[in-house]
Image: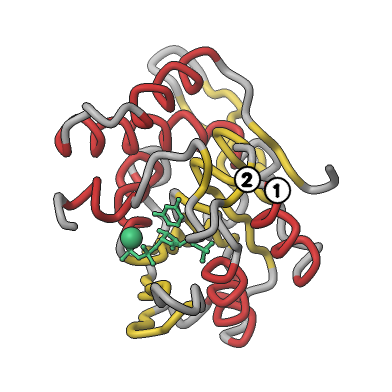
Amino acid sequence: MNNLTVIDHPLIKAKITQMRDVNTTTKMFGELVDEISGLMCYEITRDLEVEEIEIETPITKTKGYRIKGSDLAIIPILRAGLGMVKGIHQLIPTAKIGHIGLYRDHDTLQPVEYLCKLPNDLEHRNVILVDPMLATGGSAVKAIEILKERGAKSIRLASLVGCPEGVAAVHNTYPDVPIYLAAMDEKLNEKGYIVPGLGDAGDRLFGTK
Ligand SMILES: O=P(O)(O)OC[C@H]1O[C@H](OP(=O)(O)OP(=O)(O)O)[C@H](O)[C@@H]1O
Ligand SMILES: O=c1cc[nH]c(=O)[nH]1
Ligand SMILES: [Mg+2]
């Protein structure tokens, strides 16, 4: 599928399996989200532009590289997206962090917005939108709409577990937004949960029901 990268790596496969396990504790679940996000960051940022700089080692002057502009923003969709921030931010510490609060209404499955705090220079930043679950795609589509309204021009979406319905929803509305997944699952069930999935990511991350 165009603009979709399902990251194929043994570490990610094994860690996602641990996350899915119903017996995985809240502590372990959070650590796994953190670790997988860091591993995914390697692939998500592969196409960032670099520029040459001159530096001095203890031995000699030499040419090196830095991320061009180093203008990134990591934007989690609350709550569950919060779990993905640290793993990425520690690799890109210059990135600004914004927040979009959305919850999915249990009956309609439509996203409801309750918070939005974004860097005010989004148009100059490469935005990494993070949310562990891409289910119907409603939350991701809404978040991308908010980001575009605020001027974002370069947006990539990183989710841990996705499904064909969610990928299609994002691609149909925003074909310019690349999607990165750690796993592509089979389908949604009648309640809008991903199958086999891992349950409610926010509840598992924060120990709520
Ligand atoms: O693709 P969708 O069908 O929109 O579903 C995915 C959304 O559902 C979950 O959030 P939830 O509404 O459970 O909020 P939470 O993170 O606060 O638990 C998840 O973290 C996504 O944001
Ligand atoms: O399977 C799902 C679907 C939406 N949100 C979740 O947290 N899990
Ligand atoms: Mg939830």
Which disc number belongs to residue 17? none
Residue 135 location (% of width, % of height) = 55, 56
Look at 34% across and 37% down and name the residue there: 33
Which mark is on residue 164?
1
Q: Which residue is the extreme one toward the right?
A: 2
Q: Is 73 placed left or right of 18 in the picture? A: right
Q: Counting other residues with Cα less than 10 Å from the Cα at mark 2, is it few (<14), some (14-19), or many (20 or more)? A: some
**Quarter of the image holding residue 43?**
top right
Q: Is residue 22 positioned above or below 132 on the image? A: above
Is the CB of the residue bearing disc 1 within 8 angstroms of ligand 1?
A: no
Residue at the location (40% across, 38% down)? 91
Amino acid marked by disc 1: Pro
Q: Are marks 2 and 1 in contact (CB under 8 Å)?
A: yes
Q: Residue furthest front?
A: 190
Residue 73 image position (x, y, % from top left)? 47, 62
Give the percent coordinates (x, y) of residue 83.
30, 49
Could you tell me if residue 85 is visible in this image? yes
Q: Which mark is residue 187?
A: 2
CA distance separating discs 2 and 1: 7 Å
| Left or right of 156, for residue 106 | left
